[in-house]
Amino acid sequence: MFETRKKSDVEIQIKADFLRNFPLFEDLPHSELVKLASIIDKKESPKYHFIYQAGDLTDSIFFLEKGTVKIGTHSSEGKEVIKAILHPKAMFGELSLLGEEKRSDFAKTMDSATFYYVMKVDDFKEVVRNNSKLSMKLISMLGRKLKNTERRLESLIIKDARARIIDFLKDNARNQGRKVGFEMLLKHSLTQQDIANFTGTSRQTVTSVLNDLKKSNLIYFKRKSILIRDMAALV
């Protein structure tokens, strides 16, 4: 009995440590983190696994610990449209907090081992109701996501395909890249089709733009990495 309880306490502490490092929960008191940790479940999914699909009931919210997840939908012609590419410390499935009853999009893993935490929407809402600071941080986070969505929509309307692809490279390098001297190295799990689906272009256009940037010595790329020679010169 003691061994079982001890293991449970360790698991809860691991979950609490994850939550403490998650931007949304970093200001919560330890007692609140432990309470949250006791009601979330950790999951692991293989590559190309649907965490949820369009039409599924919207009863859970998710917190990404490791791996990459794409959020998307399909056009009437069946073409995949990627709305967001998520990395660790991202929350997703949040439309459940805004009244969505069934999923309008999908969440799909892009790495061989993706770890994430799942919390019931009703449990999360109760925690938010009882903590005004958390409520304000949640509103701020949702506001930033809305601004990013608006910025992407403006980009699709105003900018040409080359500019959208370059914006994609620079945004991802800023968010997930690593400085190597004066250069920026971006390691990723994306195919060129994924980049096309995110930027509203075609795979052939992505290939053409990347090759052109490589010939101009602005980038160097391999299958799972892109090295940007000079962020300021990449236009």
Image (tube, rainbow, N blue to C red):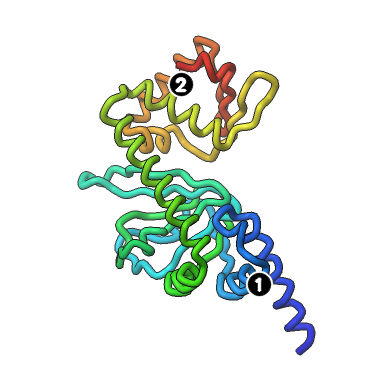
Q: Residue at x 47, y 36 (%)?
A: 191
Q: Residue at x 34, y 69 (%)?
A: 57
Q: Residue at x 57, y 21 (%)?
A: 228
| Residue 136 falls left or right of residue 67 | left
Q: Examine the rendered structure and indicate whether residue 73 appears above or below residue 103.
A: above
Mark 1 crowd level (few <14, some 14–19, many ≥20, 10 Å Cα): few
Residue 113, visible in the rendered structure = no
Q: Amino acid at mark 2?
A: Leu
| Image coords of residue 125 (percent x, y) | 44, 70
Whether label 1 touches label 2, CB < 8 Å: no
| Residue 215 falls left or right of residue 99 | right
Judging from the image, what secondary structure is the residue with disc 2 in? helix
Residue annotated with mark 2: 210
| Image coords of residue 212 (percent x, y) | 45, 14
Q: Earlier in the sequence, mark 1 or mark 2?
A: 1
Q: Residue at x 32, y 44 (%)?
A: 80
**Residue 31 - label:** 1
Mark 2 crowd level (few <14, some 14–19, many ≥20, 10 Å Cα): many
Judging from the image, what secondary structure is the residue with disc 1 in? helix
| Image coords of residue 189 (percent x, y) | 53, 40
> Quadrant where the N terminus lies?
bottom right
Q: Examine the rendered structure and indicate whether residue 205 appears above or below residue 147.
A: above
Residue 18, visible in the rendered structure = yes
For residue 52, which quarter of the picture? bottom left
**Could you give the CA–CA distance between mark 1 and mark 2, rounded to whole angstroms?**
50 Å
Q: Amino acid at mark 1?
A: Ser
For residue 201, which quarter of the picture? top left
Foreground: disc 1 or disc 2: 1
Q: Examine the rendered structure and indicate whether residue 36 appears above or below residue 133.
A: below
| Residue 128 falls left or right of residue 16 | left
| Residue 35 falls left or right of residue 150 | right
